Amino acid sequence: METLDSIKTSIPEKLYSVLQAEGIDKLRPAQTKALKAGLLDGKSLLVCTPTASGKTLVAELAFMNAILNRKGKAIYIVPLKALATEKYKDFSRRYGKLMNSGMSIGDFDSSDPYLHTFDLIITTSEKLDSLIRHHAPWLRDIAVVIIDEVHLLNDPGRGPTLEILITMLKQLVKDAQLIALSATIGNEKELAGWLDAKLVDDKWRPVELHKGIYYEGKIEFK
């Protein structure tokens, strides 16, 4: 694995200091692949890797690089309000001294004009869909769009809203960097093509996964 020092000169000094203070000293395979694919150069990426393999840090590098280099705002789209709250707390704790983060998950009949004061906006698909339809003026300042759990496009409930949302964003902020995060899926190449993004896939996981069958108190591993 490559070390954090390998990108020290490629990211803002303040960002490097925060990551170092967080105890991050090595880059996981997916993170290294994303960097080589143009993560810090504004390239759109679809990152398909197992759970806990480091996808979130890929997103953090993208939006913090854009914010600290004054390229524009970042928006982080999640499927659930609870996940939005979790991300808001995590990012505020880690990067609160470097940027302002806000959360918008409430009233669908409001354009939430106060959001223009934030660098990072965390929201759900449904709320962002509402913000777009209300013509929130700050949307044109978006430089990075993060779509967490993009594989939910296949979900019969949330999938259609997410698909329409991505389609609208591609028209509304054509020059924005799109970072889509997903667990391993079967049609990743087709999805990357539809997103107009480079595919970053990797099978590495922090804990090796073993498959087996449990029967009568015993496990037989394959």
Image (tube, rainbow, N blue to C red):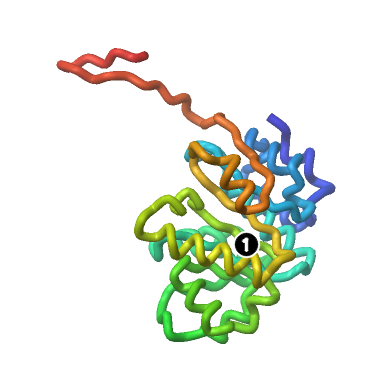
* Vertical comparison of 66 with 7: above or below: below
Q: Quadrant of residue 156?
A: bottom left
Write the residue at 52% across / 54% down: 148
Q: From the top left corner, tell me how far across and down residue 132 is, in percent.
A: 55, 77
Q: Is residue 67 visible?
A: no
Q: Quadrant of residue 70?
A: bottom right
Q: From the top left corner, tell me how far across and down residue 86 is, in percent.
A: 45, 60
* Vertical comparison of 184 with 135: above or below: above
Q: Which residue is the site of mark 1?
A: 145
Viewer-side residue, 193 vs 93: 193
Q: From the top left corner, tell me how far across and down residue 94 is, in percent.
A: 59, 58
Write the residue at 48% across / 39% down: 51
Q: How many marks?
A: 1
Residue extending farthest to the left is 216
* Vertical comparison of 111 with 11: above or below: below
Viewer-side residue, 132 vs 73: 132
Residue extending farthest to the right is 9
Write the residue at 48% across / 77% down: 130
* Vertical comparison of 193 with 30: above or below: below
The answer to whether 211 appears left or right of 136 in the picture is left
Disc 1 crowd rating (10 Å Cα; few below 14, some 14-19, many 20+) is: many
Q: Label 1 is placed on what type of residue?
A: Val
Q: From the top left corner, tell me how far across and down residue 184 is, in percent.
A: 50, 38
Write the residue at 73% across / 49% down: 39
Q: Quadrant of residue 7?
A: top right
Please tell me whether mark 1 sits on a helix, a strand or a loop: strand
